[in-house]
Amino acid sequence: MKSDRTVAHDLPVPEKGPAPGPRPASAAPRRRGRIRPWILVAVMALLAVPFLFPTWWMATSSMKTTSEILRVPPSIWPDAPSLEPYTQVFALQPFAQQYWNSLYIAVIVTAGTIFVASLAGYAFARIQFPGANFLFVVVLVGLLIPTEVTIVPLFRMVNSLGLIDTHWPLVVIPILGAPSVLATFIMRQFFLGLPGELEEAGRMDGLTRWGIFWRIAFPLARPAIAAVAIFTFLKSWNMYLEPIVFLSSRDKFTLPQALTQYVDAYGGPIWNVQLAATTLTVIPVLVVFVIAQRHFIQGLAQTGLKG
Amino acid sequence: MTVLATSPRADRRQRRSAWRRRDAATGLLFVSPAVLGSLAFVIAPLVAVVWFSLHEWNVLAATFTFEGAGNYERMLADTSLHAALVASGWFSLGLVVLNISLALVLAVLLNQRLPGTTFFRVAFFSPVVVSIVAWTIVWGFLLQVDGGINSALAAVGIEGPNWLRGNVTAMVAVVVVQLFKNVGLNMILFLSALQSVPEEIQEAATLDGAGPWRRFWSITIPMISPTLLLVSILTVVGSLETFALIDVLTQGGPSNSTTVLVYYLYRQAFEFNEFGYASAIAVLLFTIVLALTLLQWQTRKRWVFHEV
C-alpha cells in the first residue's frame, strides 16, 4: 500500500529508487485524461454485437427460405422476404390460442402479484403486529428456493387436485408462492421509505388502515409497482419449467413451450417457421421495452434491489 | 374501563390503544395471503420434498415405500450425479465470473458519459426482456457447425468447432448464451451503484495522484461492494436454476456434459419417474443454494465496505 502511494507521487520523476515491479506504462508520461472517447465507443459497439445480432438474425431469417438460412456466409437481409413462414406458424399449431394463453396468464399473475405483494409489503413495513418479524422470515424463505427444488411436491399437489393440464397452477403458484416473494420484498423496501407524516395525516382525517393503504400509500408506490409489474410480467411470459411439467395438450401450451414444438417428423426444427414464431413472441416485448426503456431500467435499478 | 373518560388525555390514550389493536389485526390480514401462500407453496413443499426423499417412489410403478437414507446412499454411488455436480460447478463458476466481470466493464463504460450511451444501455439490456427459450433457439441456430458464429470466425480465418457436439465447447456455449442473456440486469444494478459514488471522493483521490486503476480498485469497488454482494448472491443462485437453456440448447448433451444438477433432477423426476430420488436431489440442490448464500453472507464483513 505504502510503496504504491510513493510510486504514484514519484511518477513524474523517472526511475527514482527501485520501483516495485516493472511497469512500462508508468515509464511513459501518463496522460492525465482518460482513454480517448471514440475508442471506448468503438469497444462498446463491438461488445454490442452479441447482444443485438441474434435478434436481428432472428427477425431477418424468419423471412428467408430454409436454404437461405443455411447459406454460408449468411445474408444480412433476405433475398426475397417472404411472410410464408408466418402463415405456417399459425397453420402448424394453435399459435393464436397459445399466444392468448401466455398473455392472459401473465396479466393475471402480474395483477395478483401486485395485490398480494403490496399488501404484505406495506404491512411488513408500516404496521406493528405480533410476530411480524417471524412471518417476514416465513415469506422470505421463498427467495432461496429454486423452482426446481419444490417441483416434485407441487406436481403431486396439482395432480391430486386434478388440475394437471389446466392453467390454474401457472396462475396461483406464482402469485402466492416463491416467485412473488421478491415483489413483496421490493414493495416493503419502498414502503419503509415512505414519510410517516402522510399516514398520520390520513389517520387524522379518519381513514382506516385500508384507506391509508389504498388512498395514500399505494398510489405513491407507483415506481415500485411499475418495476414489480415489469419483472413479474416477464417472468410469467417467459416461464418454461412449470408449463412443461403441468401442461400436456397443445391448445393449453404457453409460448416458450410452443416455440420448441415447431419440429418436423424427425424432430429436426423447421427453422424459418420456428424463427417466425420466435419473432412474434419477442418483437412486441422488445418494442414495449424500447419505448419505455427509461422506466424499465430505472425502475429495476432504483427499487430496493440496491438494498 | 376503570377510568371514566373525563380527562381528554386518558380518552385519547384509550382510543389509541383500540386503534393499535385493530391495526395489528389489519396487519395480520394484509400479510395473510403472502404468508399462507408461502406456507402452502413454499414451506409445505419444502417439508414434503425432504419426506419424499426418504422414500422409494416410482410414479409409473406406483411404489411408495419408506427406505430412510436409501436415496442418499444411492447418490453417493451415482456417478451420473457426480458428473452433474461437476457440470454445475463449471457452469456456475464460469457464468458467475464472466457475468460479474462483464457487467462491471459494461457499467463502467456506460458511466463515462460517452456519446451513444442510451443506445448502448438499451442494447446491452435488451436480451433481458427476451424470453430465454427464444434467445436460446436463436443461439442454437447461430451455434450450428455452419451457423453464424462459425461464419464470422471463418471471416477472420478461424475454423470454428461444432460447438454443441463437443463436451467442452458445449459447456462454453451454454455459459456464453446465458451470459449475454442476463448480464444486462447486473450491469444496470452496477451502473446505479456507480452513479451513487460521490464524485468528490474520486476527485480527492485524483488530487492525491491516484490513477484510474487505483481509483477503481481502492474507491469504486469498496463503495459499490454492497451491490457486488447482492449481485453475486443473485447470480450464484440464478446459475444453479438454469433449466430452460439446457433443455432447449443441448438437452444435457453431448454425453451428459451439460447435464447440470437441475436438469438431472428434472430427468429423474419427469423422464424416469423416480420421484423419490429426484426429491433427494432437490434436497441436495437446496442445501447447496443455502450453503453458498450463507457463505457469501458470512464473508461480507471481510470485503463489503459498508453494511447494506
Image (cartoon, coloured by chain):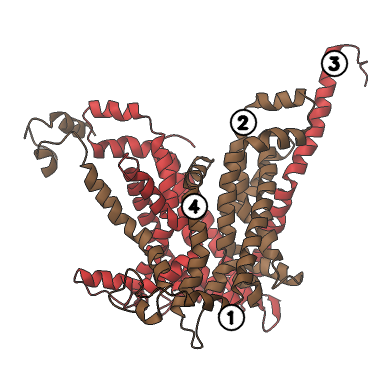
Chain colours: A brown, B red
Mark 3–mark 1 distance (CA, rounded to whole Å):
70 Å
Query: In the image, is B220 to the left or to the right of B283?
Result: left
Mark 1–mark 4 distance (CA, rounded to whole Å):
41 Å
Mark 3 chain:
B
Give the residue number, with chain letter if any, for mark 1: B272
Residue B4 image position (x, y, % from top left): 93, 15
The amino acid beneath tag 4 is: Phe
Kindly identify which numbered label has been placed on residue A289. 4
Residue B133 image position (x, y, % from top left): 49, 67
Residue B121 image position (x, y, % from top left): 39, 48
Q: Nearer the viewer, mark 2 or mark 1?
A: 2
Q: Disc 3 or 1, which lies upstream in sequence? A: 3
Towards the viewer: A70 or B161: A70
Mark 1 chain:
B
Mark 2–mark 1 distance (CA, rounded to whole Å):
52 Å
Residue A227 visible in image: yes
Q: Nearer the viewer, mark 1 or mark 4?
A: 4
Q: Circle 3 — which element?
A: helix
The amino acid beneath tag 2 is: Leu
Q: Marks 2 and 1: same chain?
A: no
Q: Quadrant of residue A54?
A: bottom left
> How busy is the neighbourhood of tag 3: few (under 14 within 10 Å), some, or many (20 plus)?
few
Give the residue number, with chain letter if any, for mark 3: B10
Residue B69 visible in image: no
Q: Quadrant of residue A123?
A: top right
Mark 2 chain:
A
Q: Disc 2 or 4, which lies upstream in sequence? A: 2
Query: In the image, is A173 to the left or to the right of A162?
Result: left
